[in-house]
Image: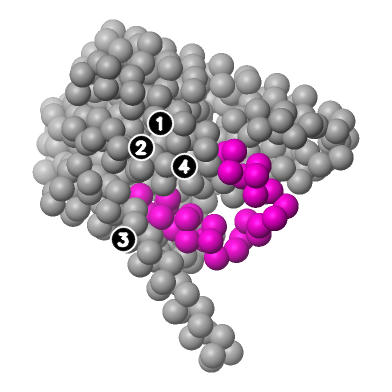
Amino acid sequence: MGDAEIWLVIGLTAVVTYLPRALGVALSGRIDPNGPVFQFVACIAYALLAGLIARMILFPVGPLQETALGNRLASAGLALAVFLMMRRSVMLGVLAGTAALIGLTVGGVQLF
Amino acid sequence: MPGLVLLASYVGFGSLVRQSGLDLPQGLASTATAWALPGQVAMVELSAVGASALSIAIAVALTNARLTPMVVTILPLFRDTGMPRRVTYAVAHFVAVTAWATALRQLPGMPPEERVGWFVGFALTLWVLSMTGTALGYFLAGAVPAPVTLGLVFLNPLYFMLILIVDLRQRARTLAMIMGAVLGPILHLVTPTYGLLLTGVLAGAMAYTTDRVLTRRESLRG
């Protein structure tokens, strides 16, 4: 992707990130945020994000390709376990998972 | 504490930006103008697999669609504050998950006239942290040993995974997350450029329909 196209994509991203916010202002007081339309939209957003996360862990496109699949899965599993044990602390979960991936890579461990 | 988590996640974004071949001004411009991390990461990741500008824009718009109900739920807290309508449109830009979640907890206990000032001040602080994180991540990715850079890039999927789990209280969303996590990798193998978009629409619609059917059955039984 060329430089000009990347700037175009960044600009488009900014627009499609502000539009849903402006739409919220326009609809405020006239629509139930727990109604079926928002429920449907939330399902699409959550599915897309979950799909992206799973894809980033299983089939990374960037430098994470150098890490073993087993190492990424084990690190993600550890992040989840620490998160659940430490009163749902996102910070500690993320730190544990990141440290695990770094540790496994430095140690030359390839789980699978 | 929410600021620290946000800073860490933007350090991850800054590293991802560098490792994906984007430069620092591009990373900073993205954080400055969009300021909603999931869409930003989707943008960088889809650019890396060579998706078209249009399909990236649609995928990012769908990812960010959750911002609309967030704005709708927070605006009643700014009623009676004397804020003009056009200012509301500017304030809406500062609605992102960390600022929003904290504001929903803090604003109700605050006198109406102090609310707008507090929210804008708080959001601007988070915004500065996000910009700092983006720059820090970008520089770190070039300066620290390679395994540490890999860890920094891995911050984002870990962060989103946990944030999504924190947010799971409704069955429809839980179903959407499970179906999306299954379909996402599969459809990526089928079509890397449109896989994410298809995942959102297909898994989202399936999850919504399943939830509706289950709700109807429950009400028939009950």
Coordinates of residue B15 in the picture (x, y in percent): 32, 20
Residue picked out by circle 4: B64
Residue picked out by circle 2: B57
Check disc 3 and give the amino acid type. Answer: Leu
Query: Nearer the N terminus, badge 2 or badge 3?
Result: 2
Element type at marker 1? helix
Local packing at callout 2 (Cα closer than 10 Å; few below 14, some 14-19, many 20+) is many
Q: Nearer the viewer, mark 4 or mark 1?
A: 1
Q: Residue at x 34, y 53 (%)?
A: B200
Check disc 2 and give the amino acid type. Answer: Ala
Query: Nearer the N terminus, badge 3 or badge 4?
Result: 4
Nearest the viewer among A5 and A45 is: A5
Residue picked out by circle 1: A13
Q: Is residue A102 above or below residue B187?
A: above
Residue picked out by circle 3: B202
Coordinates of residue B78 in the picture (x, y in percent): 78, 39
Magenta stretch prevailing secondary structure? helix
Check disc 1 and give the amino acid type. Answer: Thr
* Highlighted magenta segment, given as a residue range: A21-48
Check disc 4 and give the amino acid type. Answer: Asn
Local packing at callout 4 (Cα closer than 10 Å; few below 14, some 14-19, many 20+) is many
Using the rendered image, report if marks 3 and 4 lie on a common chain: yes
Q: How is the image coloured?
A: one colour
Q: Give yes or no for contact between labels 1 and 2 (Cβ–Cβ under 8 Å).
A: yes
Coordinates of residue B101 in the picture (x, y in percent): 63, 41
Element type at marker 4? helix
Give the quadrant of residue B79.
top right
In the drawing, what numbered circle is on residue B106?
Answer: none
Q: Give yes or no for contact between labels 4 and 2 (Cβ–Cβ under 8 Å).
A: no
Using the rendered image, report if marks 4 and 2 lie on a common chain: yes
Residue B133 within the segment the image draws in magenta: no
Q: Is residue B98 visible?
A: no
